[in-house]
Amino acid sequence: MKNKKFFGLFLLYSLINIIFSYYHYNFYLNYLKPLFWLIFLLVNYKEKIKNINTKNNFYITIIVSLIFVILYYLEGFFLGFTKSPLNHSLLGFMKNLIIEVIPILGLEYMRYKMLKPNRHHHSFIILFTTLIILNEINIFSVFAYSKADLFKYITSKIIPSISSNLLFNYLSLNSNYYLPITIKIINQIAILLFPIFPYCNWFIKGSFSIIKTVIIFLILKHYLFSQKNSQIKMHQNTFATLTYALTLIFSTSLVFFMLGLFKYEPIAILSNSMFPKFERGDLVIYEKNKSISKGSIIVYQKDSELIVHRVVDAYNDIYITKGDANNIVDKKEVLEKDIKGVYKFHLKYLGYPSIWLQEFLNEEMK
C-alpha cells in the first residue's frame, strides 16, 4: 500500500468523526471537519491539471452536473417545493460554502492520491471506500432507528452514498480529482443558493440520487472509453450509446411510474375483499382524475389507508362502496376528495414484494 501517510491521516479523521458524531456532531460538521481538510490541503496540495483530456472531461462534467441540478429542481413541479432551512444571506452563504466545499476539495484530493497508486489493490480500495461511506453517515443514529426508519435511512442515505462513491472512485482512477470535485461542488452550490427544495420523500430522494449517479457514470464512461480507444468502430459506439439511453429511459420511467408521477399509478392489494375480480398480492393499476359512476371500482383513502372497492350507490358527490366479496357495504361514506382514481386493470402476483416489505417493516408494531 502506497501513501501510508494519507491513509493514517484518514484513519485519524475517521476517529474524530466517530467521537464527535456521538458527542458534538454539529460542532464537528461546522468547525472540526472543514478545519481538518483545510490544514490537509495547505500541507499536501501540489497538483495542477496536466493534460488537455482532463480539461475536456472537466467541461463535459460541468454540463452534466448542471443538467442534473435542473432535473433535481424540476421534481418540485411534480411534487411541490418546501422552504430551505439554510441561511441565504451573503454571510450565511459564504459560511455554508466554506463548511461544505473545503471538505469536498480535501476528500477528493485524498481519494485521488490514495486510489491512483493502489488501483490494483482491490481490497484496499474497498476498505478506503467503506471508511468514506461510514464518515458520510451518522453511525450512532442508525442503532436507534426502528426497522421502518432504518429501511428509509438505508434507501435515502446509505445506498446513494455507496453509488456516488463508486462513481467518484471510477473518475479518480480513470482521470483526475477535478471531475468528482466539479460534480459535488456544482450540486452543493445549487442547494446553498436556492431558497426552496423539491419536496422529496425518502424513496424519491434515494431513487433520484441513484439514477443521477448511474447516468453520469454511463455518460462519462462512454466518453472516456471512446477517447482512449479511438480505433473502436463507430457502429459499436452508436449501439452502446443507444443501449445506455434505452436502459436509462426504461428504468427512469419505471421509477417515476412507481412514484405515481404519471396519469396511471400502481397499488398492491392487501386483502381478498374484491375476489374474484382481483385478490391479495395482485397489483392494481388505476387512472387518476377519472369520471365515476355506479359500478366503477375506485381507489380511495380513509384514515391513511388506501382501499379499492366498487361503487354501489352515489348521491350528492357521496359514494357508497362495497368489496365484491363482502356481504355488507363499507361503513364509511366516500367523499369526492377521498378518491384517488378509478381501476383500469390488474397484474397477478406483482404486488407481493410490496406486501412482504410492508409486513416486515410493521412486524415490530404487532
Image: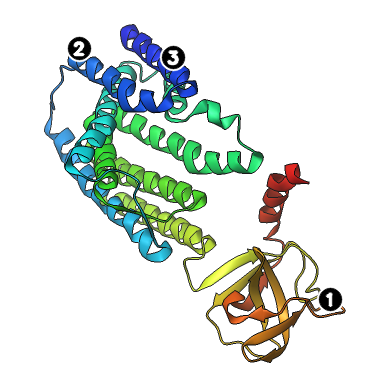
Residue annotated with mark 1: 325
Evaluate if marks 1 and 2 touch, with contact meaning CB atoms under 8 Å apart: no
Q: Which residue is mark 3?
A: 15
Task: Decide which of tag 3 and tag 2 comes sooner along the chain.
Answer: 3
At mark 1, the secondary structure is loop
- Residue 342 vertical position relative to residue 116 in the rendered view, above or below: below
Q: Nearer the viewer, residue 311 or 235?
A: 311
Task: Name the residue at 74% across, 76% down.
Answer: 332
The Cα–Cα distance between marks 1 and 3, rounded to whole angstroms, is 60 Å
Which callout, 1 or 3, points to the residue nearer the camera? 3
Q: Earlier in the sequence, mark 1 or mark 2?
A: 2
Q: Residue furthest right?
A: 327
Q: In this image, 94 relative to 257: left or right?
A: left
The amino acid at mark 3 is: Leu
Query: Percent from the top left, x then y, of residue 189?
Result: 24, 43
User: Which quarter of the figure has residue 180?
Assistant: top left
Q: Residues within 10 Å of mark 2 (few under 14, many from 20)?
A: few
The kind of residue tagged 1 is: Ala
Q: Earlier in the sequence, mark 1 or mark 3?
A: 3
Identify the mark at residue 43; answer none if there is no mark: 2
Q: Residue 149 is drawn in which quadrant?
A: top right
Provide residue 185's location: percent of width, then percent of height: 25, 38
The colour scheme applied to this rendered structure is rainbow
Q: Position of residue 214 (x, y in %)?
A: 39, 45
Separation of marks 1 and 2 at Cα, in angstroms? 74 Å
Q: How many marks?
A: 3
Q: Is residue 127 left or right of residue 193?
A: right
Q: Amino acid at mark 2?
A: Val
Instruction: Kindly state the secondary structure of the residue where label 3 is placed.
Output: helix
Task: Please give left or right for residue 127 compared with residue 365 in the image.
Answer: left
Residue nearest the viewer, comparing 356 with 101: 101
Pick whichever, 221 or 28, lies toward us. Answer: 28
